[in-house]
Amino acid sequence: MSNRNNQHEIESPKSHKLCQIYTDFIPLFLDEGNFIPCLILSDRTITCMIRALSLQDISLQDISLQDHNSLFPPQVLTLEELILLLSTEGTSELALALFVSSIHFFVHHTDFSLFRYMKITQLCVLIHKVDDLLCLLSPRLYISREEVYHSIF
């Protein structure tokens, strides 16, 4: 059992650090007007943050163990699991879960022609919302203050 806990302690910071690395690349693609890489990186950052949170969240680990027969959280979370993970004081968990699910859907949709109508201002609003979400969730991780996610704006 302690080996499992050690694995969670190791993977959680790795996921969190990847989150910062991915977001640091977003402004480079944004300046070039490359929408798709920005969306893919946004999805990856949210996925990394949620993975880091789920690795340390005992209640989700219990759900994962029972429902998925796994020591680690599933690759795809149900809406209920997302709501549990995203619950924060003063925000709508359902709205956050739907936002996360929407980004994940758009990125994994095979037809990228949907994005040709997207304007740079719309993409910036979306990326700001992703950045705000990461800033909101990051302090919930059991990491040092220096490792907390830093906004890219």
Image (spheres, rainbow, N blue to C red):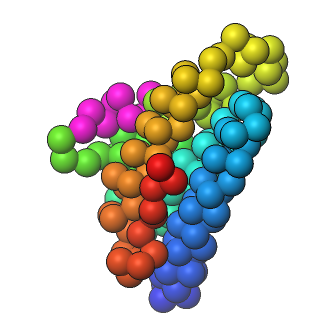
In the image, residue 50 lies in the stretch drawn in magenta: no
Residue furthest to the front in view is 31
Please tell me whether residue 67 is drawn above or below residue 111 in the rendered image. Answer: below
How far across and down, in percent of the image, does residue 134 sit?
44, 52
Residue furthest to the left in view is 90
Please tell me whether residue 5 is drawn above or below residue 58 in the rendered image. Answer: below
Residue furthest to the top in view is 117
* Residue occupying image coordinates x 61% and y 43%: 42
* Residue occupying image coordinates x 39% and y 54%: 135
The number of discs equals 0
How far across and down, in percent of the image, does residue 113 sit?
80, 14
* Residue occupying image coordinates x 50% and y 80%: 9
Whether residue 98 is visible: yes
Q: Which residues are magenta?
A: 91-98
Chief SS of the magenta region: helix
How far across and down, in percent of the image, does residue 129 sit?
44, 37
How far across and down, in percent of the image, does residue 147 sit?
45, 75
